[in-house]
Image (cartoon, helix red, strand yellow):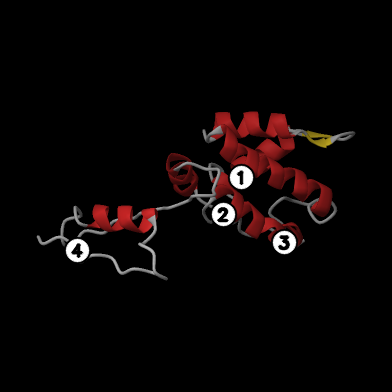
Amino acid sequence: RPLPAPLPRAMGRGPSTALCVAAALAAFVPEGAQAELRVTPKGSCTVRDVKLIEAAGGGHGDGSFTKLNADCGAKAWNAFTGINPGSYKGCLKRAAPVSEPCAQCFAEGGVWGYSTCKWHCMVSWCSASCIGCNKAHLDKLDACIGATAPRPTICTDA
């Protein structure tokens, strides 16, 4: 198979390193095969982390990554202090297991969710009200992890 054509120059400079690497790797993918390349220069989660997270997926069922997060939030919660980020991270690293920087993103999301949405989430973490409130933090979470986090599904209309 022939090598790909040279990459075009952008704004008088050469293409980005990530684009060059992607093009070079694409040359080795057999025809007809699909390849996936994740470039997450600012994300805290590794490619391995993202694969683990995606494999567990969203929803609200047991074993889903979103349910693991809810469970870790419940274990890290204290009536006097709220969510303990260290406990949350430790729980998630054991349950998923993801890297420390990746777990930090989700711990920060748990702290944000508790401080902002606790009244919306009194009935359930997967209630329509709780999910609706937490949507305000999803862009920040996605930016932190460097990918799109799995989304929970509604389990109750409350």
- Going by the numbered disc 2, the residue's amino acid type is Gly
Circle 4 — which element? loop
In front of the other: label 1 or label 3? 3
Closer to the N terminus: mark 3 or mark 4? 4
Q: Which residue is mark 3?
A: 136
Query: Can you tell which mark lies on residue 59?
Result: 2
Rendered view: 91 above or below 44: above
How far is the residue under mark 2 from the one under mark 1? Answer: 8 Å
Name the residue carrying label 4. 4
Pick whichever, 42 or 84, lies toward us: 42
**Outermost residue, right side:** 80
CA gap, disc 1 and disc 4: 44 Å
The three-letter amino acid code for the residue at tag 4 is Pro
Mark pair 3, 2: CA separation: 18 Å
| Left or right: 17, with 69 as reference point | left
Q: Earlier in the sequence, mark 1 or mark 3?
A: 1
- Judging depth in this view, the residue of 40 and 106 nearest the camera is 40
Looking at the rendered image, the disc whose residue lies closer to the viewer, 4 or 2, is 4
Which mark is on residue 29?
Answer: none
The Cα–Cα distance between marks 3 and 4, rounded to whole angstroms, is 42 Å
Could you tell me residue 24's position as x and y percent? Answer: 25, 54
Quadrant of residue 135 within the rendered picture: bottom right
Q: Nearer the viewer, mark 3 or mark 2?
A: 3
